[in-house]
Amino acid sequence: KAGWTQRADLAALATALGAQNIRWVGGAVRDTLLGHPVKDIDAATPLRPEQVMEACKTAGIRTVPTGIDHGTITALLDGGPVEVTTLRHDVSTDGRRATVAFAQDWREDAARRDFTINALYVDPQTLEIFDYFGGLEDLEARRVRFIGDPHQRIREDHLRILRYYRFQARFGADLDEAAEEACAELAPTMKGLSRERVAMELMAILALPDPAPTIARMRARGVLPVILPEAGTSQIAALQRLIETEARFEAEGRALVRLAALIPAVKGVAESVAARLRLSRKDRDCLACLAGARHADGDAPKALAYSHGGTCAAGRLLLIGADPRPLEDWEIPDLPLKGGEIVQRGLSGADVSRMLRKVEARWIEEDFPGRERVLGLLEEELSDRTTS
Ligand code: ATP
Ligand code: MG
């Protein structure tokens, strides 16, 4: 029995819908049974979305129709949002999106989920577990097993290939040979998926404690080449080394730094990977900076942190096998000099920012000295200007 199942706000939600009308399902149930911390709680209900909203309103629970078309209402509880989704079954799929219909049957709802360990339901009152496809046994064995035939389930939704590897990397002990073969065979179908969804799954895999063995297997099975053809054997070895370095220095493993390890240090490659994965501008810049790590080993870490941010600078250190900790304790300073002070010294227009940049460059070069030295640097630069 996990603490969250006893939460008063969840009990109130169950009472609002009628306890027989709601069951906790998916990741929260799975992670609780594994003794892992629970992130977010999902619920399933035979009630229609409008009925869920109405029942919550009557009970004074605020809701947001976050995905009303496919049956999801988010209940805003004190302990956090809970997604309540109407029981569904797939009507048709094209591998990218499914057309679903609302259903009344819990087992039908379970059957359209991906893996047996993700299809466990819990009664909110009795805490009885409903296990329609042997999920408990698989959980015990740390087995990530598709519900039904892996080929068919992947043809319904090609993203399940990456979900398989993600859960495999997280929980899997034994490999499911049938699933691995289906993933290998159907890997090319992932080309039709939305790049955002692919990127999210890939980054989620890379954010796990040790994704290297899984990434290596994805490559061996021809899955990685479809989404990240840039990653060859030496890049996989670089990822392994990075993860060892992270462990050695007790550094936080970051998905973006690990992605950088998987990219050959060739100009322009990071940018094209970032564009393909639709990374944000900030992540793209950071990835490009990280990817440059291996041919700019001598760069001063503090200077890097100042110009590219702490995450990026620490990542570069990790990528070359160095200790990032000194950087993590360092707060990035502001140049202790204002443009106005340069104006007071008689400069104007573009000369002001030019002077600021000059002083800043020397300030960085001298390892960020205090204001007194900065004023001294300004004097030197000003007299250089008048003498030249
Ligand atoms: P996580 O801890 O990563 O959030 P999760 O199991 O909660 O794990 P979600 O992606 O949040 O995963 O999905 C919630 C549930 O919805 C899953 O447990 C699974 O039952 C179902 N589900 C999600 N995506 C799919 C999919 N592509 N195909 C089938 N079922 C899915
Ligand atoms: Mg979840």
Image: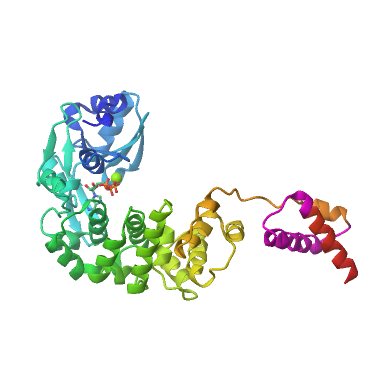
What residue do we see at 83% from left, 62% from top? Answer: 380
Q: Position of residue 262 (x, y in %)?
A: 38, 67
Q: Report whether residue 348 is seen.
A: no
In the depicted view, which residue is nearer to us: 138 or 80? 138
Q: Quadrant of residue 154?
A: bottom left
362 is higher (above) or lower (below) than 129: below
337 is higher (above) or lower (below) than 320: above
Q: Is residue 115 in the magenta section? A: no
Q: Report whether residue 103 is seen.
A: yes
What residue do we see at 47% from left, 76% from top? Answer: 266
What residue do we see at 25% from left, 30% from top? Answer: 5
Q: Is residue 367 in the magenta section? A: yes
Q: Quadrant of residue 197?
A: bottom left
Q: Quadrant of residue 188?
A: bottom left
Residue lying furthest front: 248
Location of the N terminus (image quadrant): top left
Q: Is residue 263 left or right of residue 298?
A: left
Q: How is the image coloured?
A: rainbow
Q: Position of residue 135 (x, y in %)?
A: 13, 46
Q: Position of residue 320 (x, y in %)?
A: 47, 65
In the depicted view, which residue is nearer to us: 197 or 307? 307
What residue do we see at 27% from left, 69% from top? Answer: 219
Location of the C terminus (image quadrant): bottom right
Magenta span covers which residues? 346-373
